[in-house]
Image (cartoon, rainbow, N blue to C red):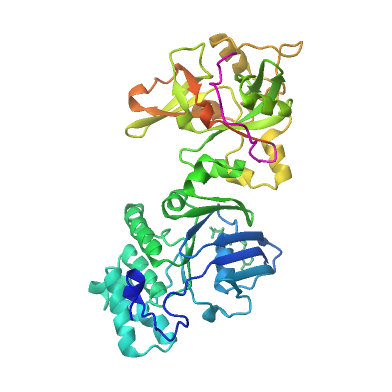
């Protein structure tokens, strides 16, 4: 009997090679999984993750964060140093790679060059002694599903990149896997075909209905393919959530910096509370104000004197003609036309928190140092911007707020030329280079992170930033 749907089109549910019928679904649970290579590198560090039946989980992270190692441990290609892996509630640590019923597609596809497409797809069936008639039938079904029927007799070197990728998929799914693992399967494709292959792959892996773990460092792929995304850093998971959650509700500075294109603006700031009046987030040359009536101001007041990172996405900034009512002002350094919208790079006199993943990958203690070391001396731009739009200031006797981050041009040569804040706006509103732009900052989209890189939980915004100032 064949089960209806794509699974049924491929697998007879009385297949004796798959005890328990053709619906061998498994929830994958990784508990405190750790891998220390003999070189002493800790590639995976006490990692916990659950991938449900039929769920597509994307492991997203920079190179070297341990994504491939996680797949190799699940597939049984490498032994874990400690921790457990279970499929469908049963531990599999003692089960050999061959018996785990895991299919894996590698970046380089791993096709046999001397075999035809049909022979490549049939290879796992031959390996498991499936008889010829059934083998041929399954290869035909898989080829039809993947649109490979016309190339079955060709060898891999006669195929396009997209076709090779589909053959690798065919070989992986021809035996019903309990778990499907994909390691950067699109990275060898030209940008031109990657999008279409990505879409077909997304449809296919969702139809397969088995727990799928997909590794990539490409956030677009992660966002398009994953039911959930696990963002990894240094062998650990920073956050797991739906693509929407990861984008709009980052719990960690690293996630905020890594996910989103164009990237989130992340600026160093100091918090200054004026109880009963407002809480000021001092960006150095400019300040953001949260009126005391806003519950966020009162919560943030507990960070009085602390250095924090302020985050907002480029589309949270809206140009305004009302300079006095604006939240931020910046000199336009560069206007990047991207079709229907533009990216405007502004110089606001702020100090960006390091965006470079290499810096954000520092151990937490060093990250704290990187995002909030001792403040450098004030920059002359502060005075210049203050002349453009006088900032209301009331602080200590010297008239200065908090720690006042400001950047040192000598330390970051060239940055002034491209600015420190990016705004996205419709092309029709594109400003001219050299112009001073006044911007409102959407208070719904303001993120604050402490020095350890953790998001500061704030109550929901109630009023615009400047109101009641
Ligand atoms: N066989 C090995 N022996 C020693 N160290 C290894 C081995 N394989 C991987 N590593 C190290 O473990 C860490 C994690 O590597 P891994 O390949 O899992 O990362 P990744 O996130 O998949 O990176 P990429 O995207 O570049 O493939 C890296 O520091 C890597 O150098």
Outermost residue, right side: 397
* Coordinates of residue 61 in the picture (x, y in percent): 55, 52
Looking at the image, residue 254 lies above or below residue 232: above
Q: Quadrant of ligand 1?
A: bottom right
Tell me the residue at 36%/31% (across/down).
341
**Which region of the structure is painted magenta?**
451-469
Instruction: Please state if 188 lies on the left or on the right of 133 as rendered.
Output: right
Where does the image place residue 69, in percent across and percent down from the top left? 58, 65
Q: Position of residue 467 (x, y in %)?
A: 55, 16
The residue that appears at 39% across and 67% down in the rendered structure is 208
Q: Nearer the viewer, residue 332 or 202?
A: 202
- Secondary structure of the magenta portion, mostly? loop
Q: Nearer the viewer, residue 104 or 333?
A: 104
What residue sits 73% from the left and 25% below the top?
304
Frontmost residue, 374 versus 255: 255
Image quadrant occupied by the N terminus: bottom left
Q: Is residue 114 visible?
A: no
| Rendering coords of residue 11 (x, y %) | 36, 77
Quadrant of the drawing holding the C terminus? top right
Q: Is residue 52 magenta?
A: no
**Could you say which quadrant of the image residue 155 lies in?**
bottom left
């Amino acid at each position: 009997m064949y089960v209806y749907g794509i699974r049924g089109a491929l697998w007879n549910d009385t297949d004796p090679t798959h005890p328990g019928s053709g619906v061998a679904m498994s929830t994958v649970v990784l508990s405190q999984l750790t891998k220390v290579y003999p070189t002493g590198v800790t590639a995976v560090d006490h990692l916990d993750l659950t991938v449900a039946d039929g769920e597509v989980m994307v492991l997203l992270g920079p190179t070297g964060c341990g994504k491939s190692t996680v797949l190799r441990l699940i597939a049984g290609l490498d032994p874990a140093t400690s921790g457990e892996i279970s499929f469908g509630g049963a531990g599999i640590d003692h089960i050999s790679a061959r018996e785990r019923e895991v299919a894996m597609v590698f970046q380089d596809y791993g096709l046999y060059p001397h075999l035809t497409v049909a022979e490549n797809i049939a290879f796992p069936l031959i390996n498991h002694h499936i008889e010829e008639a059934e083998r041929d039938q399954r290869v035909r079904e898989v080829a039809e599903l993947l649109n490979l029927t016309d190339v079955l007799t060709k060898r891999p070197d006669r195929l396009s990149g997209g076709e090779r990728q589909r053959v690798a998929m065919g070989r992986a799914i021809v035996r019903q896997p309990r778990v499907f693992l994909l390691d950067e399967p699109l990275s060898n494709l030209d940008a031109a075909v990657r999008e279409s292959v990505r879409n077909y792959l997304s449809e296919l892996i969702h139809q397969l209905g088995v727990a799928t773990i997909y590794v990539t460092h490409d956030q677009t792929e992660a966002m398009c393919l994953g039911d959930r995304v696990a963002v990894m850093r240094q062998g650990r998971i920073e956050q797991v959530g739906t693509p929407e959650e990861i984008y709009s509700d980052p719990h960690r500075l690293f996630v905020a910096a890594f996910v989103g294109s164009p990237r989130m603006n992340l600026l160093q700031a100091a918090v200054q509370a004026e109880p009963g009046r407002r809480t000021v987030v001092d960006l150095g040359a400019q300040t953001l104000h949260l009126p005391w009536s806003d519950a966020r101001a009162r919560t943030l007041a507990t960070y009085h004197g602390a250095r924090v990172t302020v985050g907002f996405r480029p589309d949270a900034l809206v140009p305004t003609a009302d300079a006095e009512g604006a939240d931020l002002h910046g000199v336009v350094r560069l206007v990047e036309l991207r079709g229907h919208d533009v990216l405007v790079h502004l110089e606001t006199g702020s100090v960006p928190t390091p965006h470079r993943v290499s810096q954000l990958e520092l151990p937490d203690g060093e990250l704290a140092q990187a995002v909030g070391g001792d403040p450098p001396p004030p920059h002359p731009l502060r005075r210049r911007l203050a002349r453009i739009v006088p900032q209301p200031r009331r602080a200590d006797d010297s008239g200065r707020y908090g720690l006042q981050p400001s950047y040192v041009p000598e330390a970051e040569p060239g940055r002034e030329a491209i600015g420190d804040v990016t705004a996205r706006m419709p092309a029709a509103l594109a400003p001219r280079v050299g112009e001073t732009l006044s911007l409102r900052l959407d208070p719904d989209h303001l993120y604050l992170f402490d020095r350890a890189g953790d998001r500061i939980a704030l109550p929901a915004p109630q009023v615009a930033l400047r109101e009641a100032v």
